[in-house]
Amino acid sequence: MTAKAIFKATLVALLCLLYSASQAIAQETLRGVRTVTVIVETPDDDARRCGITKELLESSALFILQQSRLRIVPVSQENDGYLYVNATVQYQAAQNFCSGALAVKFRTSGMVSTRHNPAPTFDVFTVFESLTIMGSPPIGLPALMQQSTESFTKRFLAEWVKQNPGK
């Protein structure tokens, strides 16, 4: 088996195991959220080689959020939390192939206490998370990342709507 075949077989196996592994922590943690900021990590050189830009990821999330009842505010304004988008990409020049991972998370902050530490302390925590891995020649990766970002943002909004009906 060639190195290329082993790589592709490994990628397919990972995709089968991890494709769209999603987690939503639905313990009324999104109730009362009215404002959201979008934070997108700046992709590295490999990601840019594969056509992934900060603008692509940000516009994909914003496109969906703008259709909701949430108010989108800049980082500099007070908000109830932020939607965090991070794409990690590796470019394999010899195979002209890009493999990537995408994470979309909603994070918020507040006073929390635990069984081990009953005194409330300020913390930042993730209350929604969707993850996936993907692979494609460079020409196809931007569409995959855009579709996944939009899909994960829709999942976040669906969870938000369940906890904030009619508001």
Image (spheres, helix red, strand yellow):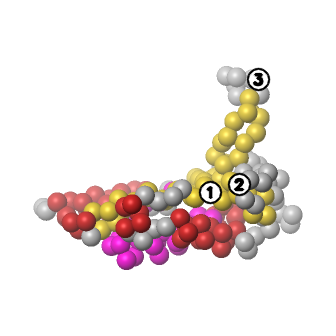
Residue type beneath disc 2: Val
**Label 1 is placed on what type of residue?**
Ile
Q: Which image quadrant: the N terminus?
A: bottom left
Residue at disc 3, secondary structure: loop
Tell me the mark number nearer the camera, choosing from 1 and 3: 1
Q: Position of residue 24 (x, y in %)?
A: 63, 53
As drawn, is 32 to the left or to the right of 99?
Answer: right
Tell me, yes or no, whether the two marked residues, 2 and 1, touch with CB atoms within 8 Å: yes
Please give the range of residues in magenta: 131-153
On the rendered image, what quadrant is the C terminus found in? bottom right
The label on residue 75 is 2
What whole-number distance in Å separates the C-alpha atoms at marks 2 and 1? Answer: 8 Å
Which residue is depicted at the point 70% across and 23% down?
A: 117
Spatial CA distance of label 1 from label 3 is 30 Å
Q: Which residue is mark 3?
A: 119
Q: Residue at x 73, y 74 (%)?
A: 67
Name the N-terminal-most of marks 2 and 1.
1
Q: Position of residue 51 (x, y in %)?
A: 42, 71
Q: Which of the two discs, 3 and 2, labels the residue nearer the N terminus?
A: 2
Q: Is residue 147 magenta?
A: yes
Q: Is residue 132 left or right of residue 158?
A: left
